[in-house]
Image (spheres, grey):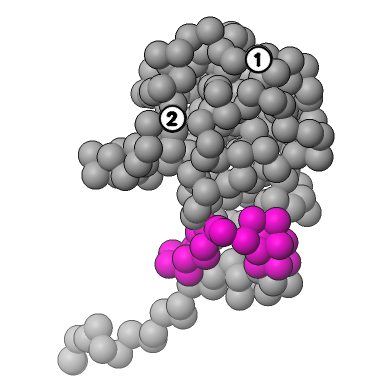
Amino acid sequence: MTATTGSHKPAQPAPLTWWVAEPRRFERDQREITAAFPVLVYDAEGAGSWHGILPLWPFERPQPAHLTDWTGTMGLQVLMVYRQAYPMVPPDIFPLDPVPEPAEWTQSRWHVNGDRSLCLLSADSLWTGRESVVDLLLKAAAWKVEYALMKHEAITQMSDRGIVEDDRFDHFLTRPPAKESIRNSLTTPDTARDHQDAGSGP
């Protein structure tokens, strides 16, 4: 009797990607992200991702007068990575510039997870799969502003809802920060490239 060889085994079907399973959701994301953040670039590798620089203040209310004294002139450089279970699970969003320090990971007051992705939902139940990823990217843009406030020690805890909806921290941004040395560390150009060269990218 001849043993069955591997060549006689039936071929395994290719894994079904989320955008094949959810073509309408894929088209919706492409349309909404491109409209809201036209500088973001889509990468189809793996489960797909978006990367680029978010606007510094993409919110409906007027930009505070001294915002850039706290944050610098550039918005958050970000990488949003889909998972194949999307849209049942939200994508992961990683800040590339500024990059939170390891000591800030997993501390709820910094809103950073242990894998360095941003914690943008106060509860898992807030993501049902019907929400727009634009809302998450807006929260990511707001994270940079609150991160600057934390670094300058103006606040000790980031807000639960984020400054997208919560304006209670706006008054800090109407005047320059007191800690000039920390501000310089947040506004140094090309820090994202330095972090990636050091192998700290996700």
- Numbered label attached to residue 187: 2
Residue located at (47% from left, 39% from top): 95
Q: Earlier in the sequence, mark 1 or mark 2?
A: 1
Depth check: 20 or 40 in front?
40
- Secondary structure beneath disc 1? loop
Classify 15 as above or below 175: below
Is residue 88 visible to the viewer in this orientation of the structure? no
Is residue 62 visible to the viewer in this orientation of the structure? yes
Q: Is residue 49 magenta?
A: yes
Q: Amino acid at mark 1?
A: Arg
- Numbered label attached to residue 202: none
Image check: 65 left or right of 148?
Answer: right
Depth check: 20 or 135 in front?
135
Residue 144, position in %: x, y? 56, 31
Image: magenta residue range = 28-50
Residue 5, position in %: x, y? 22, 86
Residue located at (78% from left, 54% from top): 130
- Secondary structure beneath disc 2? helix
- Numbered label attached to residue 175: 1
Depth check: 105 or 40 in front?
40
Classify 201 as above or below 27: above
Q: Is residue 19 magenta?
A: no
Residue 161, position in %: x, y? 74, 27
Q: Amino acid at mark 2?
A: Thr
C-alpha separation, residue under disc 1 versus residue under disc 2? 17 Å
Mark 2: few/some/many CA within 10 Å (<14, 14-19, 20+): some
